[in-house]
Amino acid sequence: TGRTFSSISNLEDADQHPPGSTVWLRGRLHSIRVKGGSCFLVLRQDSFHTVQALFFKDKEDPDGSKKMINYLKTLTMESVIDLEGTIVGDANVKSCSVQTVELNINRIHAVSKAQSQLPFLVEDAARSEAEVEASQSTDRPFPRLGQELRLDNRWMDLRAPANNAIMRVQSAICQLFRESLYAQGFNEIHTPKLIAGESESGAGVFTTDYFGTTACLAQSPQLYKQMAISADMGRVFEIGPVFRAENSNTRRHLCEFTGLDLEMEIKDHYMETLEVVHKCFVHIFSGLESRFGKELAMIREQYHSEPLTFTEEPCVIHWPEAQEILTEKGFDMGDGMGDLNGAMELALGEAIKEKHGTDFFMLDKYPSDIRPFYTMPDPDDDRFSNSYDMFIRGLEICSGAQRCHDPDLVQEILQKKGIEAGEGLESYINSFKDGISPHAGAGIGLERVVFLYLGLDNVRKASMFPRDPSRCTP
């Protein structure tokens, strides 16, 4: 067409777009009001940027004006349109992101018309819960959009500025994760998601027929990360899908999520890995606030949260200390060998925030019985293990450990846990028999990091198209 399209975001740059110049824009029809011989519409790009455009009846061309008005009346909200307009300066449009400039419409064309009856309005999806609640006592209450309605029409829900920004923050976390680990000498790997046998740990897997044999969708890249260490890769990471067939209908569980995984050789102690992971998270937290402030501001406008607090050095709490804190908080910890439930994690998070001033901390030395078979026992007391979890705002976002690299000990632990070392584990154990460096690693849930960093009320808001026990579409 020979047209050069501009961005709404730079329309206020008078050097690029002086008053009187013409521009072509492509965007969504955010709103439109046609009355008599005039039209006011708002064009939206990238969910964030909006500009007002106007058309007024031309007395010198009544027929042309009538055709334009009639065409404008056919346009539906959320349609994708091309618009040629003339820049008008000295505007005062408080309802748009571009406030000092508006456009006089010369030409307009619908590239893709939206249906006239939308599932809901983007404007309604963009309101905060406080705003919706406050409106309920007025004569024009705003509609409260339920989670299922939003998720059934997720592509519409993600057009709301805050929801769109959440996906951009998710992307940013992956970018910052990669940046930090590349800078710390890691290589990115890509491991299989179809695994022989029923499971790496005995439960919670999706199984499928694999040409007459049983295979499962990977619960994590765990086995392959460790085999990469046996292959002398040194330090590896992966960003990929993780599948959990757990019938958990909670605000923090998904059946499919994105794992941020890493594994590395250690020379002396698993603290080496904790320091690497802490450095990575500090890079993520600092980078989000310094480089993605626009997105965070957009999100916090609809979903209020305070910026995350964290320490410059790792804040590591040991299992016995956590037991003492929770006992003081009134929890019955029994023999101290059971796993923490959600209420305990939240209470522990509150106590650590009060004592150390951080929303992000690590807890190590979990009991061996509640950790996976590949976890290295504590050499001083094998009832406990060289394992750790990491928490944001009192909820777990990461699990890791020093791995057991002795093949005989791995088989002993498998037998003790009642797990059969089938063909799925045979090659894994063989990789240790050919010699492997001591190593440790961690598995992080991307959506959970997004959900907790942003202080959202449900992990589904942090997933583009969430999968849970009752949802496999869209």
Image (cartoon, helix red, strand yellow):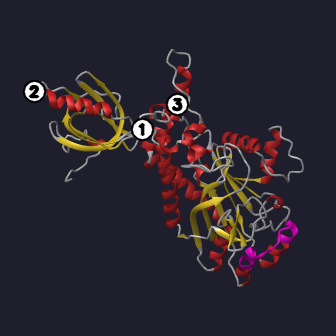
- Is 280 displayed left or right of 168 in the figure? right
Q: Quadrant of residue 75?
A: top left
- The amino acid marked with disc number 3 is Ser
- Is 314 displayed left or right of 246 in the figure? left
Note whether 347 is above or below 467 in the view shown.
above
Q: Nearer the viewer, residue 194 or 227?
A: 194
Q: CA distance from mark 1 to mark 3?
A: 26 Å
Q: Position of residue 274 (x, y in %)?
A: 64, 61
Judged from the image, the secondary structure of the residue bearing numbered disc 2 is loop
Judged from the image, the secondary structure of the residue bearing numbered disc 1 is loop
Comparing labels 3 and 2, the label whose residue is closer to the camera: 2
- Whether residue 273 is visible to the viewer of this picture, yes or no, is yes
Q: Residue furthest right?
A: 335
Mark 1, residue position: 115
Q: Is residue 44 magenta?
A: no
Residue 128 is labelled as 3
Q: Position of residue 89 (x, y in %)?
A: 20, 32
Judged from the image, the secondary structure of the residue bearing numbered disc 3 is loop
Q: CA distance from mark 2 to mark 1?
A: 34 Å
Q: Is residue 416 magenta?
A: yes
For image coordinates 77% across by 58% down, the residue present is 365
Q: Earlier in the sequence, mark 1 or mark 3?
A: 1
Residue 60 is labelled as 2
Point out the stretch of residues depicted in magenta.
Answer: 414-429
Note whether 162 is above or below 315 in the view shown.
above
Q: Position of residue 129 (x, y in %)?
A: 56, 29
For image coordinates 73% across by 53% down, the residue present is 246
Q: Earlier in the sequence, mark 2 or mark 1?
A: 2
Q: Nearer the viewer, residue 195 or 162?
A: 195
- The amino acid marked with disc number 2 is Glu
- Is 25 displayed left or right of 268 in the figure? left
